[in-house]
Image (spheres, coloured by chain):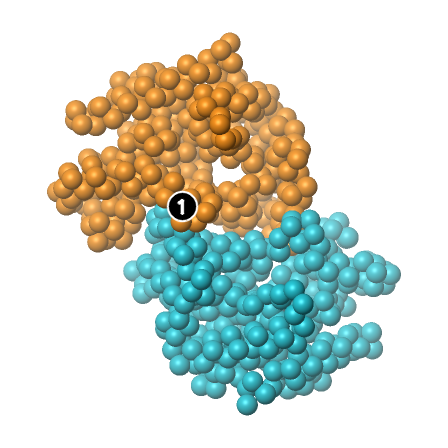
Chain colours: A orange, B cyan
Amino acid sequence: MKLPVRIAITGAAGQIAYSLIFRIASGELLGPEQPISLHLLEVSAALESLQGTIMELEDCAYPLLQDVIMTDDATIAFSDVEYAFLLGAKPRAIGMERSDLVRENGKIFIEQGRALNDFANRDVKVLIVGNPANTNAYIAMHSAPELEPTQFSAMTRLDQHRAFNQLAIKTGVEVTDVEKVIIWGNHSSTQYPDIHYATVNGVPAMDLVDEGWILNEFTPTIQQRGAEVIKVRGKSSAASAAHAAISHMRDWALGTDQWVSMVVISDGSYGITEGLMYSFPVTIQNGHYTIVKDLDIKPFSRERLVQNQQELEHEKDMIMDLLA
Amino acid sequence: MKLPVRIAITGAAGQIAYSLIFRIASGELLGPEQPISLHLLEVSAALESLQGTIMELEDCAYPLLQDVIMTDDATIAFSDVEYAFLLGAKPRAIGMERSDLVRENGKIFIEQGRALNDFANRDVKVLIVGNPANTNAYIAMHSAPELEPTQFSAMTRLDQHRAFNQLAIKTGVEVTDVEKVIIWGNHSSTQYPDIHYATVNGVPAMDLVDEGWILNEFTPTIQQRGAEVIKVRGKSSAASAAHAAISHMRDWALGTDQWVSMVVISDGSYGITEGLMYSFPVTIQNGHYTIVKDLDIKPFSRERLVQNQQELEHEKDMIMDLLA
């Protein structure tokens, strides 16, 4: 049998983790032949509740699950891991300014970036889900100078799935008929869901929908979908976020010919400031992503790309002193 | 592409369903080539909260998920379904006698049995998870005279997984090294987890553990595990129950050479009253289970088998007038 692959999950007692852990343990990430070990990280106060999750993991008798480590120490959690799902982040408390939120999370992701730098497998792939995801990823990346910046990513895959689904509903097709929808920029309500290159059964999406729908329905629906789910569910998205996280990491590990959206370090493509963590369309081969190049960006899109860039630069300014 | 298979899930806004639905939609039940339709049943008061789950299902852009029906009408929920996961049941309210609980649930499962009888696919496989699971299954089965009694089952698979895991821990092996552990009887704390025929890497388990451990640790641990999880987690088992439900139904659909435990109608094997819904070891080929026969039952085991039979006959007596 193969040696187990070590997988870290932070915020392991949270709702997204509860939807994610059992799917990874069943083989949905790396397939039915790959044994795994789970490294579950939580703050000390949540370890007791995490113990319940571990009992349930035992009670599944998963054939692939070799062992489970539970810890509040990032250096243990990240030891030798090849995949790291960073779900945990400090939520916004009442009366807290956004800048305070960004800075509070900054401290967490500096610590986690350092621990990844010092203890993770040298080929580790890191996915940041906890918000503000792009900036948290920026901080973790900068705190891990011995890892490649391209080993860090943040998640816009849930937004991408939402955009695929809305376009499929609008055009009356299956989601599998839709291709090349892009999420650009920041995983915030500023994000730009872009269907200018999308096809529906091979037909350009732009020939099938009108601009009024894009502006007044599609775009705000995607941007506000998270808030809408909270309104209906009374809780934030968990199972759909977990599904997006598996999809993101599985495609990164196993490759895909489709365009998928990932927050990755900008190489200056499309004029986006080099070094910024920004969501781009990518394709993936052999565990390495490549930003889709040379798309013709119209002024309508350019404005939105720049708006996202500015928002991310502003977030970066809030935390630059922490990285000094 | 294949035609979709229709799958019903009751108690669809509950915690087990939230852990189950997204795994089924991703293909974990019937594989990555089989499109599915989900029929989600809930009581009227829970439909609004279920709407949140449906939004999240949309937001997953699942390639296999053809459509989702949400309803409070069992006749719609069970129309043409090939698999039915009956998770929903009335929980015990404060001050409620057990007999009241059994009878309250009786009414639900009469209605659901009738709807299955009248509207489900003629080859439907039914799994009852909601407690009291054996007796609920007995009621549903008797309310569906046009279906075969062998199309109804209830779940002891979670108990089986727990027993596999505890024996693996005790003997220091992987769960995949363990075989032929049996859960007999009622899915209640009376259940009898039996390792008399079990092997660990081919060695009889009875040669590896002593009777004191079986009596004083193993048996009560399995019987009380559900309560223990509630104590630690603050909530009842959800993800592990969902995993057991998928395992039960997948093995039933696709077959297994292993012994697995299922609550099915007794054919009189081991002296258990014919017609009672009772957990036996079974093997499964071509979608049909066969009770493992001719095991040598020692007096120690016999006593426990009879105890379970008596408990189930007592539960049956509480509801027989409802079936008249």
- For image coordinates 65% across by 59% down, the residue present is B161
The amino acid type of the residue labelled 1 equals Lys
Q: Position of residue A266 (x, y in %)?
A: 35, 21
- For image coordinates 40% across by 45% down, the residue present is A231
Q: Looking at this view, is A6 or A98 the one in front?
A: A98
Q: Is residue B91 above or below residue A23?
A: below
Q: Position of residue B279 (x, y in %)?
A: 65, 73
Can residue B256 be seen here? no
Q: How many marks?
A: 1
**Residue B129 position by quadrant:** bottom right
- For image coordinates 27% across by 21% down, the residue present is A306
Secondary structure type for disc 1: helix
For residue A197, side relative to residue A291 (left or right): left
Q: Position of residue A95 (x, y in %)?
A: 49, 27
Q: Identify residue for label 1.
A: A231
Q: Looking at this view, is B7 or B12 the one in front?
A: B12
Q: Residues within 10 Å of mark 1 (few under 14, many from 20)?
A: few
Can residue B246 be seen here? yes
Q: Is residue A89 above or below residue A104?
A: below
Q: Position of residue B76 (x, y in %)?
A: 37, 71
For residue A116, side relative to residue B224 (left or right): left
- For image coordinates 16% across by 40% down, the residue present is A212
* Chain letter, disc 1 residue: A
Q: Looking at this view, is A246 or B18 the one in front?
A: B18
Q: Is residue B8 above or below residue A126?
A: below
For residue A173, side relative to residue B15 (left or right): left
